[in-house]
Amino acid sequence: PGPARRASRPQSWRVCHYSASQRRRMPGSSATLVPETGVQRDWEEREFAQSIQLGIKSLAQFLNEFENTTRTKLASLNSKIARLERRMTLVEATFDSVNQPPAATS
């Protein structure tokens, strides 16, 4: 017999790395050989697309909440400024009436 040949894995097999929680459920190492199928790739692509959609949804939800909160705070600030402007006008009018020289009587 000739020299021992090392068995190579088929082209349709690839190394999959699992998360720590997945490894806890599996005996063996962090890398496991599994056959790659079209269905598996499809699921991986769907999971990736779903994670992107979730990220976009979360971002849109944050932006909507931020816009609502900002709009409310700006409206409150606007009413406070309007109140201060009215008070300032009253104070100016009072100050002007006190500082006017007395009217000359004939």
Image (cartoon, rainbow, N blue to C red):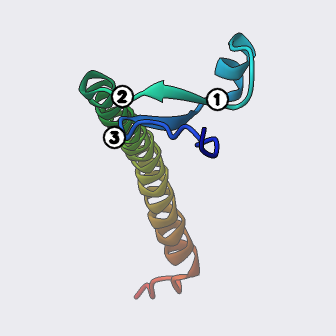
Q: Residue at x 43, y 43 (%)?
A: 66
* Number of residues whose C-alpha sits closer than 10 Å to that of mark 2, classed few (under 14), some (14–19) or many (20 or more): few
Disc 1 versus disc 3: nearer the observer: 1
Give the secondary structure at mark 1.
Answer: loop
Which residue does the image show at 29% across and 29% down from the upper left?
46
Residue found at x 74% / y 21%: 28
Name the one closer to the observer, 62 or 81: 62
Is 16 on the left or on the right of 10, as rendered? Answer: right
Task: Tell me the CA gap for discs 1 and 3.
Answer: 24 Å
Location of residue 79 in the rendering, given as x and y in whole percent from the top left corner: 42, 48
Q: Is residue 106 above or below residue 52?
A: below
Amino acid type, callout 1: Ser
Marking on residue 65: none
The image quarter containing residue 23 is top right
Q: Kindly check if marks 2 and 3 are in contact, taking CB atoms under 8 A apart as contact.
A: no
Quarter of the figure with the N terminus: top right
Q: Which residue is mark 1?
A: 19
Numbered circle sitting on residue 47: 2
Q: Position of residue 100 (x, y in %)?
A: 51, 82
Dot 1, how many residues are within 10 Å of its Cα: few (below 14), some (14-19), or many (20+)? few
- Which is more N-terminal, label 3 or label 1? 1
Q: Which mark is residue 56?
A: 3
Q: Nearer the viewer, residue 33 or 96?
A: 33
- State the quadrant of the C terminus: bottom left
Q: Residues within 10 Å of mark 3 (few under 14, many from 20)?
A: few
Q: Nearer the viewer, mark 2 or mark 3?
A: 2
Q: Earlier in the sequence, mark 2 or mark 1?
A: 1
